[in-house]
Amino acid sequence: MNELYRINLRGKEFISSSELLREFLQNLVKSNLAVIRQNGDIFVDRNPMIFYNVLDYYSGDGFHLPKNICPIQALKEVEFWKIPSKDIPSCCYEVLYDEHEAQYNSIENFDSDLKTQANQTVSPLYEEKKTKPSLERLRYRLLEAHTHPFSTWSGRIWIFLSALVTITSVVVYLLNSDEQFRIPREDLPVLSYNLTYEEAIVNHKYLVLIKTTREPIKSALEQFTNVLLLLELMLKFAITHQKKSFVCSLQNVLELLTGISVFFVVYLDRNGAEFMDDPVLEDILVVIGILQGLRVIRVLRLVESTPGMKVMKLSLKESWREFALLVMVLTSFSLIFGSTMYWIELDHPDTFPNIFVSIWWALITMTTIGYGDFYPKTAGGYCIASLAAVFGLMLLAMPITILASNFNAFYNCYNYRRRHLLSRT
């Protein structure tokens, strides 16, 4: 047995006979990371908690990490004691590479982005041109109210008014789309060949839009709320310093298109009879209607102000790999079951007219929706349908479980961090 020697870590003494550890400690002494005391002990200013496991490693018994240790601290100690990653067993990966560390980093980066938007309110030229300090202070307060609406009274007032206008706009839009809340149009022209509008227009939905119009009060209210929301969007653009990212934001672009389309919809609704002979009238109604219907995304702006929605948005963003896996798996098995079903049902011309319909059927079946418009009629088709349903349940359960677990982990991390920050104030 080799000669024994003592190692002192912040008052905690250890005894070892490992020559390999002795050589390593001598190198630490040469690097001024350790000190040889007068009594011959080697003093190292490190946390002694993990050193029991370090002794096991340098004694040839392998290296293991305790469960009750911070992963960041564990990684630092592993790096300090020069333990190669290949010598760390798989049972310690959970301790060393704790997933919550990445989630905390994502939450902190997300919060830091919001703080950056609020803190970068002073223009770089402000130090040179201090001619309008009051405008800069107003800009700071508005941006602070926008990024942290529940932290100031101005933010609470802003979010309340924005919610009121948004909800009013959406409710008026829904009412104006229903036949019961529209009034008959008075300026309908007489159709040629003595045709009635019911005979000329087969689609009842188009017939309602042509023969009726909005009530003047609701139409004016819709335009007024739309103007207010456009002004709010312009205000957000004016106060932010990240104008490029603001312009490139898909949600901001859709809000702008939605606001502009409202005026086209109102004009077309008032003068719809003039476009009766236009062959692209139906296409125009569909495009403008879709753009107008996108106004409901404004509700997401309100929900984003809540901590729960912020965590959900962050967890979905960080779970893109699981989303990609879900799409790939569903696409692959939809192709497999759909193509198989098409050839099995080939003798029945009234079941699946083409292979694309069968693939669509497979996707609907695997997602447990099952509209019932297409279904198999042979014994082989029944077997394939049963397999598709069972595989769909299993394939959807795995990625969705991961997504739910990610959201739960992010939400817990967010609450822990919030409680920690509140305890410091």
Image (cartoon, rainbow, N blue to C red):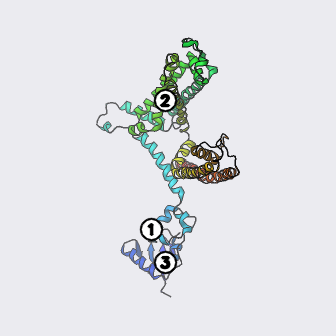
User: Which residue lies under the disc numbered 1?
Assistant: 79
Q: Would residue 369 be found to the left or right of residue 38 on screen?
A: right
Question: Residue 253, position in %: x, y?
Answer: 45, 34
Nearer-the-camera pick, 371 or 90: 371
Q: CA distance from mark 2 to mark 3?
A: 67 Å
Q: Amino acid at mark 1?
A: Glu
Q: Would residue 241 be found to the left or right of residue 15 on screen?
A: left
Q: N-terminal of the two: label 2 or label 3?
A: 3
Outermost front residue: 347
Nearer-the-camera pick, 202 or 126: 202
Q: N-terminal of the two: label 2 or label 1?
A: 1
Who's the residue at 28% across and 37% down the image? 128
Outermost right residue: 379
Q: Nearer the viewer, mark 2 or mark 1?
A: 2
Q: CA distance from mark 1 to mark 3?
A: 14 Å
- Contact between marks 2 and 1 (CB within 8 A): the answer is no
Question: Residue 246, position in %: x, y?
Answer: 42, 37
Q: Amino acid at mark 3?
A: Tyr
User: Which residue lies under the disc numbered 2?
Assistant: 258
The secondary element bearing badge 2 is classed as helix
In the image, residue 124 above or below residue 73: above
User: Which residue lies under the disc numbered 3?
Assistant: 58
Q: Amino acid at mark 2?
A: Thr
Task: Identify the image quadrant of residue 308.
Answer: top right
The secondary element bearing badge 1 is classed as helix
Q: N-terminal of the two: label 1 or label 3?
A: 3
Question: Residue 204, position in %: x, y?
Answer: 61, 23
In the image, residue 314 above or below residue 46: above
